[in-house]
Structures are given as structure tokens and as C-alpha cells.
Amino acid sequence: MGRFGKFCIRMIYMLTDACFGYLAIFLACLIRSHKVPFNVNLHSVLFDAENPFRLVFALWLLMVIIINRAHRLYHTDRMSSEISELLKVLQSNFIGMVLVIVASYLLKVEGLPRTVVAIGFLLMALFFSLWRVIKRFIVESLVIRGYNNRNVLIIGAGKAGRGLKEEIERYPGMGLRVKGFLDDAPEHVDEDLRGLVLGKIIDFRRIATQYFIDHVFVTAYHTEEVFLKLLLQARKFGIAVDVVPFGYRMISGDLVKHNIGFVPLLSYSPNGKGQHNIGKRIFDLIVAWSGCILLAVPFLAIGILIILDGAGPVFYFSERFGRGGKRFKMMKFRTMIVGADRMQEELRERNEADGPIFKMRDDPRVTRFGKFLRKYSLDELPQLFNVIKGDMSLVGPRPFPVDQIESSDLRQLRRLGVRPGITGLWQVKGRSDAPFGRLLRWDIWYINNWSFGLDLSILWQTIPAVVKGRGAY
């Protein structure tokens, strides 16, 4: 897509925001029409001389569009998450609302109802968010069908390169197509990736031209000279370059770029973990209490069906390790027959999961209704009470049963540094299908990179993962 095409799309996005912003202000005035001193209609909101607030409303629209543009909300960044875009929308609208209040004070506009501003803010945020969700769905559908895809070359076919390839393929809506790897030691590459190694780093110019490469991801290089030469060649061909930071699995907090003199630095900075923990706990309590109230009737119905299915007691309590190694009883709806724990050793040879986890697709201990509960993770809902009690969080590493923790595995012990969660990266990425080692890496990455936005993103992605029943048994 050329520059003119991108410019036209940005203008369409801005006009869409302007229209929805205008509609939000109009509806806010209409809802509180008894509080405004003019007849509310589509024309009067901005163009009627009898409307004393028309200048403030015009500034409101203009400021929100300017702030949205500053937040790059008129670009479709396929590599950013939907949640991060919606958070930017909320932030822009909140700043816009504050500026409107300040502007009305500076312009000495009297009588502007605060409820109109508040309703306008809520409607504007809602409209801007909804149309962006629809836009993303349309764009991702087109991209998956091949529209405006980008050919990708990964430098380095080691663990980082393989992991990046897997993540790119997991999100086809980004429109990235991995054409292959460049690696200076192809003999050390895993056998299943060797066929994708197109050459060595020195071959970059030829490979980039031959495969029409649009984007390069650098996961490994040997010397600064090699890296700089690669950057210069990529710039010459107009190819975008992203670099995976070394040690990214262990990075905690945000990556912050700054300079000391002319030397650029990347800081791996933790961000007030204590404050984050307090905010996370408050959010957990609000959602957990709300969930328990809203799900009271479904809880009762599930309990009755479990009793009718003859599974025994409605709830099953499993001893798990929580934060700091503290043991607690995790609640679940019963999905197995009474005495299932005693049968596990007899079924050990039929275990289909690697590592210390025990999983079977056709476990004879699972009841008929239990299979349904497990498929859609409904058996996990009582853990909302564990969240209220403080043993668990909504999002976090899944708690292992006590007998499945290996004290010699430092990765498993490190998971005990945070509260375990009802859902996490396991649930949105692989559930029961992923290898145990990969599940641990996801947990460590979550612990090192926790943010409120990440929790919201995982909760959002949990919904379709659960509805599809993918990888659950």
C-alpha cells in the first residue's frame, strides 16, 4: 500500500472518530436535555447560536482527535494487542474530558452540566472502542486471506528464533509470513528447522531480494560489525528491523529507552510491584464478588446436575501450593467419581502429559457431566471463592497439586513467588496440549512481564479459548 493509500485510510479513521464523537455529544445532550438551555438536535450541538456550549463541544471533538492521533490510534498496528489499543482509547478520551472541563473554565462558559460531559465521555469511549473492534476483525479477516501480508526473515534459528516463529504463526491476523531463517551455524539447528534455514547472515542481501522480505527479526548475531552491516543493508532495501533483546525470558518490568550522552540504553525497570499487587488484589476482589453474585443460579444448576450424575459431593478440594509455598485447598466442581485420586497410580502408565502433570484424554474416572464441565472449564468456577479468600488471583500461573511439584526444578519453585491464577497463559495459548517445558516458560514470562494490561488481555483471550473448548480434557 502506497503513502497516498495510507493517508486516505488515516483520514477515514479520523472522520469516523469525528462522526462518532459528534454522535456521543449529541446523545449526551439529548439524555440530559432538561439541563441544557437549547433545543437539542443534530444541528444545534455545534452550529446553533443559541447553544452557549458549541465552542466547547467543537474543542472537545478537536482535542480528542488530536490526542488519538498522538497515541497513533489512526494507524492499524497489527503487532499490538486489541486490549492495548482500547486502553489508549480510554486514556485519550479521559484526557479529552479533563481538557474540556479546563477549557470551559478558561473560556468562562457557565452552566455546562457535568453530567453531559460524563455521559459524553462514556459514550465516546464506547463508540470509539466498538468501531475499532469491528475494524480489527475486518482487517484481520482480510489479512488472513492474504491481503497486505509481509514476508518475514528471522536471523537466528535457535530457541529465540523458534519461539518467535511459533508466536507469529499463532497470530495469523498480524499478516506476517515467515519465509525462513538465516543462521551462521546451521549444523546446530534443530532438525525440523534445518529446511527453513535459507543461508548465513552474509547472504542477507541475496535472500532479502529473492524472497521479497519486508520485515526482519534479529534474535542472534555474533559481532557488532555483523549487526551494523545487517542494519545498513536492511535500511538500503527499505526493510523494517526488530531486535529481540538478549535474555528476554528473564526481563521484568518495562523496556525503557533512554540515553547517557550519545549512547542509547535499554533499561529493564520493574514498576512499583507493591502498588501493582494492591491494584491487582482490588481488581480480583471486585470481579470475583461480582462473578459469585451473577453466577449464583448457574452454580446451583451445576450442583444439582452433579448430584443427579451420581458423582458424589458437589465440590472437590485439591491441596495445592500457593504464593510463597503456602498450601491451600483449591475448590472445583467435582468431575470425577469418588476415590479417583487413589486410582491415579494405577493409570500412571497411560499419562499423556510430559513432566510431573497427569493428564488423560479418555480418563475412565471422569463422569459424563464431568467431561462437559472440563471441556468448557466450568469446573474451575468455584475458584472465585479462592480468589476472595486470597489464596488465588484471577490471572496467574496455574497451581500444581502438591505431589506434582519437584523441589529440584527451580523453574517450578519460581512460580510460587506470585498468587496462582484461575486462568493464565496456559489457558489462552495451549491448555492441556502444550509441552510441560513450554508451559513453565510461559509462566516465567508472565511473572517477569506482569502488567494490568496483560491481565486484561489474558482475561479477554480466555473467553474464546474456553468457548471453543480447545485443548481441554
Image (cartoon, rainbow, N blue to C red):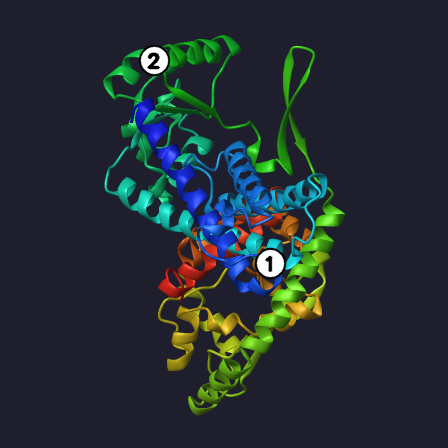
* Vertical side of 425 occupied by 139: above or below: above
Dot 2 or dot 1: first in sequence order is: 1
* Vertical side of 268 occupied by 323: above or below: below
Which structural element holds mark 1? Answer: loop
Q: Residue at x 44, y 61 (%)?
A: 463
Q: Residue at x 70, y 54 (%)?
A: 279
Query: What is the crowding at mark 2: few (fewer than 14 residues within 10 Å), some, or many (at least 20)?
Result: some
Q: How many marks?
A: 2
The front one of 196 and 244 is 244
The front one of 89 and 448 is 89
The residue identified by callout 1 is 36
* Vertical side of 283 occupied by 88: above or below: above
The C terminus - image quarter: bottom left
* Vertical side of 348 occupied by 261: above or below: above
Q: Amino acid at mark 2?
A: Phe
**Would you say residue 426 is visible in this rendering?**
no
Name the mark nearer the viewer: 2 or 1: 1
Residue 193 position within the rendered picture, expressed as x and y whole percent measured from the top left: 32, 32
**Would you say residue 45 is visible in this rendering?**
yes
User: Residue pushed farthest right?
Assistant: 274
